[in-house]
Image: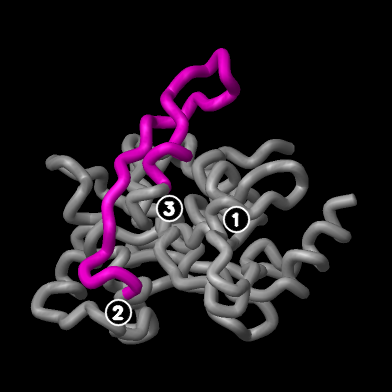
């Protein structure tokens, strides 16, 4: 039997502004796994969002697709912005992404890190989780590890949580930990991220 999940209206913020220090500065957004750039994977996962903001360096502008179903991209045309200060961390990136979303915003925000190739498979489970009860959000948990950067959050709750917070270098746990969220089990490892050359090699091997 096919599950029916209520449609959740959301915007998306894709975080693509990290230093990638353990990858010798290689842009994670441009990494190719399974024949597809990580940026394109994240945008495909966000395809049902009303609007998408990519938070990253200016050079990503030339990599952003234009909405054109004929070319294979049917999602909303992404907006590019930069966290302040650059490399200020995920909370600073989220704050910049929310500021870049034109008003009025959707009631929910899909937050994705660009370095999580399997995130698309989790979206329906996040939607289902927030539709079951009145919560501030939902995020994946794999083997006891929370992945806050694959999550669906109530926009008003994020705005309240960010109000008055010094976002530069702030830990994501401080923001999300203050919200009432549902933990969505991730036994398949959809939330696994790519931080090192070994991660890249492992993921490419698994994709064969």
Question: What main secondary structure does the magenta stretch of the protein show?
Answer: loop
Q: How far is the residue under mark 2 from the one under mark 1?
A: 21 Å
Instruction: Identify the mark at residue 119; answer none if there is no mark.
Output: 1
Residue 81 magenta = yes
Q: In the rendered view, how is the structure colored?
A: one colour
Is 172 included in the stretch rendered in magenta? no
Toward which corner of the image does residue 174 lie, by quadrant?
bottom left
The residue that label 3 is drawn on is 131
Mark number displayed over residue 175: 2
Callout 2 environment at 10 Å: few (<14), some (14 to 19), or many (20+)?
Answer: some
| Residue situated in front as seen by the camera: 174 or 52 | 52
Q: Is residue 200 left or right of residue 48?
A: right
- Circles 3 and 1, Cβ within 8 Å, touching? The answer is no
| Residue at the image point whose x is 25% and y is 44% from the top | 106
Mark 3 Cα shell of 10 Å, populated few (<14), some (14-19), many (≥20)? some
For marks 3 and 1, the one nearer the N-term is 1
Nearer to us: label 2 or label 3? 2
Which structural element holds mark 1? Answer: helix
Q: Position of residue 139 (x, y in %)?
A: 49, 67
Identify the element where label 2 is drawn. helix
Residue 52's place in the image compared with 172, above or below, is above
Q: Which residue is at the far top?
A: 70
Rendered location of residue 100, percent (x, y)? 20, 49
- Distance CA(mark 2)–CA(mark 3): 21 Å
Residue at x 68%, y 50% (from the top left corner): 32
Residue at the far left: name it.
164
Q: Which residues are magenta?
A: 60-87
Distance between the Cα atoms at labels 3 and 1? 19 Å
Front-lying residue, 189 or 63: 63
Helix, strand or loop under label 3: helix
């Amino acid at each position: 039997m096919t599950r029916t999940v209520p449609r959740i209206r959301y915007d998306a913020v894709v975080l693509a502004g990290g230093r990638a220090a353990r990858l010798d500065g290689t842009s994670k957004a441009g990494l190719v796994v399974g024949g597809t750039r990580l940026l394109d994977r994240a945008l495909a996962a966000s395809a049902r969002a009303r609007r998408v903001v990519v938070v990253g360096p200016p050079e990503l502008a030339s990599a952003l697709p234009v909405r054109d179903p004929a070319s294979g991209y049917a999602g909303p045309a992404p907006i590019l912005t930069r966290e302040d200060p650059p490399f200020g961390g995920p909370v600073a990136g989220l704050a910049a992404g929310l500021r870049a979303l034109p008003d009025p915003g959707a009631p929910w925000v899909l937050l994705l890190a660009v370095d999580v190739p399997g995130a698309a498979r989790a979206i329906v489970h996040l939607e289902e989780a927030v539709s079951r009860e009145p919560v501030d959000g939902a995020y994946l948990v794999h083997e006891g590890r929370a992945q806050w950067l694959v999550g669906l959050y109530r926009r008003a709750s994020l705005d309240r949580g960010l109000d008055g917070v010094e976002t530069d270098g702030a830990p994501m746990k401080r923001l999300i930990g203050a919200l009432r969220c549902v933990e969505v089990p991730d036994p398949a490892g959809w939330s696994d991220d790519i931080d090192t050359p070994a991660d890249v090699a492992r993921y490419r091997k698994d994709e064969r």
